[in-house]
Image (tube, rainbow, N blue to C red):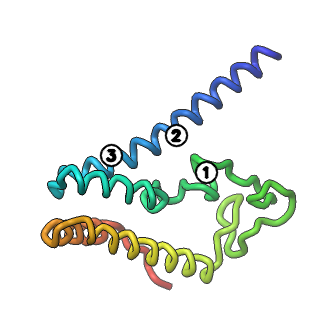
Amino acid sequence: MIWLLAAVFTVTAASAQENNGQRERQRFDRTEQMVKEYNLNAEQAEKVKALNEQYADLFMMRGRGPGRPGGPRGMAPQAGQRPDGQAGATAQQGQPRGDRQMPSREEMEKRMKERREKMDAYNAELKKIMTPEQFEAYEKRMQEMRNRRPQMPRQ
């Protein structure tokens, strides 16, 4: 029994370290990609790195962040359990999806608005760091990415 508990603890600790390393790599990879793609100088690279760290939550994998079911930085709430771990109904109301509740339309719209505002703030800071040509190339690349993303049908 003790060996089994030790094995479970070891696997859990290794998984947590791997997730932390993966988040760090994502931030580093984004900065490195931007340095290469937009030909940033050393001063710009340092500023972009700091900006990417400040806004790291914008760039984590969608649907897998903190407080989201299945996220690498938190445990998914179990069916009939609130995200804070207490028994009872889930904190979010809306349509059921599997064993968890979908957020309401209002909650989704609120989250999207907050994300857009945060992205606008990120872009405003980035615009101060980059030259006009670099920022234009960045905006063009972001538009291409938005165009490639599958669109969800409106109801």
Q: Is residue 56 above or below residue 129?
A: above
Q: Which of marks 3 and 2 is nearer the N terminus?
A: 2
Q: Which of marks 1 and 2 is nearer the N terminus?
A: 2
Quadrant of the image for the N terminus?
Answer: top right
Q: Nearer the viewer, mark 1 or mark 2?
A: 2
Amino acid type at mark 1: Gly
Amino acid type at mark 2: Asn
Q: Do the residues labelled 1 and 3 touch (CB within 8 Å)?
A: no
> Judging from the image, what secondary structure is the residue with disc 3 in?
helix
Q: Which of marks 1 and 3 is in front?
A: 3
x 36%, y 68%: residue: 150
Query: Dot 3: within a 10 Å radius of its alpha carbon, few (fewer than 14), some, or many (20 or more) residues?
Result: few
Q: Is residue 51 found left or right of 42 in the rendered image?
A: right
Query: Dot 1: within a 10 Å radius of its alpha carbon, few (fewer than 14), some, or many (20 or more) residues?
Result: some
- Disc 3/disc 2 C-alpha distance (Å): 14 Å
Amino acid type at mark 3: Asp
Query: Depth check: 96 or 143 in front?
Result: 143
Quarter of image, res 5: top right
Q: Is residue 51 found left or right of 86 in the rendered image?
A: left
**Residue receiving disc 3:** 29
**Residue receiving disc 1:** 70
- Disc 1/disc 3 C-alpha distance (Å): 23 Å
Q: Residue furthest right?
A: 87
Q: Which of marks 1 and 3 is nearer the N terminus?
A: 3
Q: Which mark is residue 20?
A: 2
Across and down, in percent, residue 139 comes to: 23, 71
Quarter of image, res 15: top right
- Disc 1/disc 2 C-alpha distance (Å): 15 Å
Query: Dot 2: within a 10 Å radius of its alpha carbon, few (fewer than 14), some, or many (20 or more) residues?
Result: few
Q: In this view, does 93 lie above or below 56?
A: below
Across and down, in percent, residue 107 comes to: 62, 78
